[in-house]
Amino acid sequence: MGEGKRVGVKPTTSDHQATNAKLTGPLLPYGRQSIGDDDIAAVVAVMRSDFLTTGPMVERFERALADYCQAKHAIVVANGTAALHVAILAAGIKPGDRLLTSANTFLASANCAEFVGATADFADIDPQSYNVTADTLRAAWQDDVRVIVPVDFAGQPCDMPSIAALARERGALIIEDASHAIGSRFTHAGKSYKVGGHPWADLTTFSFHPVKTITTGEGGAILTNDDRLAERCRRFRNHGMIRIETTGPWYYEMPELGYNYRLTDIQCALGLSQLQKLDRFVQRRAEIVAAYNAAFDGHPVLRCPRLPQPSAFRLQPYSVAWHLYVLQIDFDAVGKTRAQVMAELRQRGIGTQVHYIPVHLQPYYRQKYGYAAGKCPVAEAYYQRCLSLPLFPAMTDADVERIIRAVLEVTQVSA
Ligand SMILES: *Cc1c(COP(=O)(O)O)cnc(C)c1O
């Protein structure tokens, strides 16, 4: 797990005040859960009930998730990585198959191929959206590609209709890694679609890790409109078992190998409670992003996240459920390294993080497949300059102003 994965489960703000006396204020992490008394009450109620796991809350959370996303099925699992693994198993990906994902993602989007003995491979990103596109996927295509895993980076959905056209033409399945993008929407040909429910992914995965937009502690889900894929996901989540009650009420069989990737009732109660607040979280995140953009747009050494130009596939600013706020910083022009900028912001009580080190450059992938620098040049250049600022719904306007002031100060170009 990257350093950032731990930030979301750091101690509370008051703990920080106690242990970071030399900071000028409380430390603002790059991401943090928002847990209210309603969430706590929902969890406590399950603790007093008959079921701690695989009780009524699992189905209720699944139904609510599917309804929210306008999808037919939701299958909840232990975490976002398990969601990708189950999706890969449901899709029937096997040794000899190749998976194509973004170079700019968390490890798990690629690792899920390796879990089943398939080959993980990487496509470059578009320099505007930082997402893969039909063009970058086409450029990286090889004959054995059986599944593509587009990642909705920072919450911004990929151009799924054009990616789906490519995948269908070449007979590949699509698993959309929407770990960042629950609550995002896009319009296509005049109609509005939600991530998780639109017709251009075979399976979509979410993560409910505490840094993500809603949380269950650890948790994840797979959404699909396909009955057969949904049935397979349920099976692989639970040891590969199927009940055959015609033989007897006790009888089950295991036709294929599965896992214990179940999510508990305790976690599903938390998820259900969090889901009620998702739209409010998304709205607050959008307000913070707008304030950052207003402050940083046009700055000589900073570049704000940009939405693609209006097109057949069209995004409205407020339809993106922003998970991350990533600045591109020209560190050379500032005259400081990224580590220096991060340290200076940290001294001012501001936590930052790097999303992401291009995955093809990880030692495992370099050694196994000989992937090297130059394979995905746009993602590599993006990585040199990226820095994620704090973005979570509990931030106050004063927090946002403090961060803006600090970033402008620390990245000042000396005359
Ligand atoms: C968080 C994340 C995952 C993995 O989710 P976990 O719940 O931490 O296992 C996968 N892909 C992306 C893009 C993520 O951000």
Image (spheres, rainbow, N blue to C red):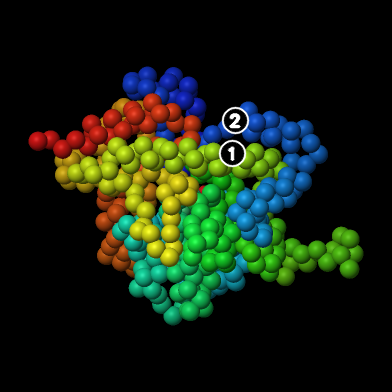
276 displayed left or right of 29: right
In the rendering, which numbered label is found on residue 100?
none
25 displayed left or right of 12: left
Which numbered disc flags the more N-terminal residue, 1 or 2? 2
Mark 1 residue crowding within 10 angstroms, few (<14) / some (14–19) / many (20+): few
Mark 2 residue crowding within 10 angstroms, few (<14) / some (14–19) / many (20+): few
Which residue does the numbered mark 2 point to in the structure image? 36
Using the image, determine if residue 372 lies above or below residue 327: below
Q: In which quarter of the image is residue 276?
A: top right
258 displayed left or right of 281: right
**Which residue is rendered at x = 62% and y = 62% of the image?**
224
Amino acid type for the residue under numbered disc 1: Lys
Q: Which of 172 and 195 is in front in this view?
A: 195
Q: Quadrant of the C terminus?
A: top left
Using the image, determine if residue 241 lies above or below residue 281: below
Q: Are marks 1 and 2 in contact (CB under 8 Å)?
A: yes
Viewer can see residue 95: yes
In the rendering, which numbered label is found on residue 277?
1
